[in-house]
């Protein structure tokens, strides 16, 4: 989301959104059969773009960087990116997960020690469903020397089958309740997407597609509100699928698409909640 999307948001929208920004894949050049850029070239402009296009608190995830690859001087990419963000006075919280490699986790720990920004932990559906999720969260927090109130947790649904919504909502609610320290986390967010992986799934155009992740969230929030339970904030993948396919564009016939959101009225339940999240709209392709 670093770029035009961030820069285009109104001041009011910026106040309500804390973006989770992923440093994108390096990309592959099928003609030369090599990476399009070196790691150095790929991330050197990231800090400047962050400062120019956003310049507000955000979450930064380097999940797409090649495992075990380091910079020319031996620094970890996480360290290099957050050194640059620090220089540019960008308030960024590092993002990690339960299965990142040890070098990645050590680099995250170094950022926390230097900046004390807290940490965001992305937990997948499969990880949340495991009986040892508390132990794994405790082990990670111990390694990073942080407490639950210094951590934001994102339950990342990725791109599941949301239907039937009522049944899937019950599953998500059960997994959410299985996470420990419910009232101690700095923040809890539910994130997912129903955007199609390819435009071939859409068929004729123009087409309007339901935002299943938003329908799920509204159903979940209503159930939690009735129970007096903590309501998580909402996140999505914008107008993207969670995966970016690596394709040889010389062999693919591209089709131009315009993707946008229709206006949507904020329901009273969420307008009064005071929580910070972006309100999604139905896809139009």
Image (spheres, grey):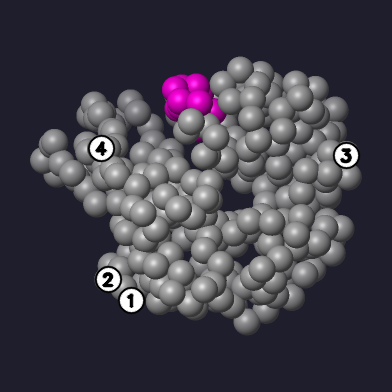
Q: Which mark is residue 262?
A: 4
Disc 1 packing (10 Å; few <14; some 14–19; many ≥20): few
x, y percent for residue 104: 76, 48
Query: Could you tell me which quadrant the C terminus lies in?
Result: top left
Residue 159, relative to residue 5: is it above or below?
below
Residue 32, relative to residue 121: is it above or below?
above
Considering only order in the chain, which callout, 2 or 4, is on the residue closer to the N terminus? Answer: 2
**Towards the viewer: 171 or 130:** 171
Considering only order in the chain, which callout, 4 or 1, is on the residue closer to the N terminus? Answer: 1
Q: Residue at x 15, y 41 (%)?
A: 207
Disc 3 packing (10 Å; few <14; some 14–19; many ≥20): few
Answer left or right for 156 relative to 199.
Answer: right
Q: Secondary structure at mark 2?
A: loop
Considering only order in the chain, which callout, 3 or 4, is on the residue closer to the N terminus? Answer: 3
x, y percent for residue 185: 69, 62
Q: Secondary structure at mark 3?
A: helix
Which quadrant holds residue 198? top left
Q: Residue at x 24, y 52 (%)?
A: 210
Q: Which mark is residue 167?
A: 1
Labels in figure, total: 4
Q: Secondary structure at mark 1?
A: helix
User: Residue at the left extreme?
Assistant: 204
Answer left or right for 187 relative to 211.
Answer: right
Question: How far is disc 3 from disc 1 in space, using C-alphas?
Answer: 44 Å
x, y percent for residue 281: 31, 43
Q: Which residues are magenta?
A: 1-11
Please name the residue that numbered disc 3 is placed on. Answer: 114
The reply to whether callout 3 and callout 1 are in contact (CB within 8 Å) is: no
The nearer-to-camera label among 4 and 3 is 4
Disc 2 packing (10 Å; few <14; some 14–19; many ≥20): few
The reply to whether callout 1 and callout 2 are in contact (CB within 8 Å) is: yes
Considering only order in the chain, which callout, 1 or 3, is on the residue closer to the N terminus? Answer: 3
């Amino acid at each position: 989301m670093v770029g035009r999307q961030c820069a285009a948001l109104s001041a009011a929208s910026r106040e309500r959104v804390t973006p989770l920004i992923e440093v994108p894949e390096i990309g592959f050049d099928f003609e030369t059969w090599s990476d399009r850029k070196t790691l150095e070239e790929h991330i050197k402009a990231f800090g400047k773009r962050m400062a120019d296009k956003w310049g507000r608190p955000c979450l930064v995830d380097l999940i797409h960087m090649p495992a075990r690859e380091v910079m020319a001087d031996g620094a970890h990419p996480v360290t290099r990116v957050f050194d640059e963000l620090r220089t540019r006075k960008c308030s960024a919280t590092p993002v990690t997960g339960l299965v990142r490699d040890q070098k990645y986790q050590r680099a995250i720990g170094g950022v926390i020690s230097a900046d004390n920004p807290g940490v965001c932990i992305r937990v997948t559906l499969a990880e949340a469903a495991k009986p040892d999720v508390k132990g794994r969260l405790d082990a990670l927090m111990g390694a990073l020397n942080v407490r639950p109130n210094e951590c934001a947790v994102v339950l990342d649904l990725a791109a599941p089958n949301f239907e039937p919504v009522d049944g899937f909502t019950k599953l998500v609610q059960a997994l959410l309740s299985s996470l420990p320290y419910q009232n101690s986390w700095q923040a809890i967010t539910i994130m997912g997407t129903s955007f199609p992986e390819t435009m071939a799934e859409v068929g004729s155009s123009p087409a309007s597609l339901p935002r299943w992740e938003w329908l799920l969230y509204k159903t979940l929030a209503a159930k939690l509100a009735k129970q007096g339970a903590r309501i998580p904030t909402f996140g999505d993948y914008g107008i993207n699928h969670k995966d970016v396919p690596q394709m040889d564009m010389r062999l693919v016939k591209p089709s131009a698409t315009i993707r946008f959101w229709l206006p949507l009225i904020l329901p009273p339940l969420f307008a009064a909640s005071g929580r910070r999240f972006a309100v999604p709209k139905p896809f139009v392709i």
